[in-house]
Amino acid sequence: MDPLKQNPRGDLRDYLAAERTLLAWIRTGLALMGFGFVVARFGIFLQEVQALQLHLASHPLGWSLWFGTALIVVGMLVNVYAGWHHIQLVKHLDSGATIPSRYSTRAVVIAFFLALIGLAMAVYLISVR
């Protein structure tokens, strides 16, 4: 007898692993949103420091507001996609379908995006001084 026909559903370990992965992606999304908020508010901090030191009119927030907003939106998208992917994965596990192994495209895309945001913030901080 074929073992897949006896138990078409996924093993409990598979469900628990899927839940741990979902929670890890949620933490990643929340961290991105929190970091985005800090970056967006960093421009206000720089503006206040300039106003106190030079007693001049304050300058606009610059790019930090845009970088921060981009990180918040990416964090939100990560959480939405993680929830959607988890639902699809549980449906596959319930049906007993085989899920092909592959590298995580979304993790690689997020890593490259964050590297670009980090590079842009470094250039911004160097140009502000």
Image (cartoon, rainbow, N blue to C red):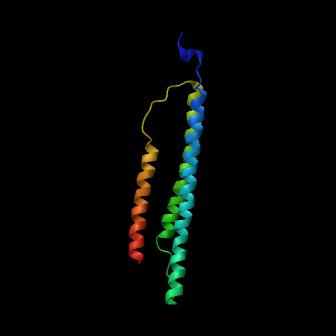
Task: Name above or below for residue 15 compared with residue 53.
Answer: above
Residue beneath the point at 42% across and 72% down: 125
Task: Name above or below for residue 5 compared with residue 20.
Answer: above
Residue beneath the point at 57% across and 50% down: 27
Residue 18, picture quadrant: top right
Viewer can see residue 91: no
Residue at the extreme bottom of the image, as rendered: 55
Q: Which of the image's four quarters has the N terminus?
A: top right
Residue 31, image x, y percentages: 55, 56
Q: Could you tell whether 39 is left or right of 115 in the image?
A: right
Residue beneath the point at 46% across and 46% down: 107
Residue 41, image x, y percentages: 55, 70
**How many callouts does the rendering have?**
0
Task: Name above or below for residue 69 compared with residue 50.
Answer: above
Q: Could you tell whether 128 is left or right of 18 in the image?
A: left
Residue at the extreme front of the image, as rendered: 13
Viewer can see residue 100: yes
Residue 61, image x, y percentages: 50, 75
Q: Could you tell whether 50 is left or right of 6 in the image?
A: left
Residue 104, image x, y percentages: 45, 41
Residue closer to the observer: 119 or 95: 119
Residue beneath the point at 51% across and 69% down: 65
Q: Which of the image's four quarters has the C terminus?
A: bottom left
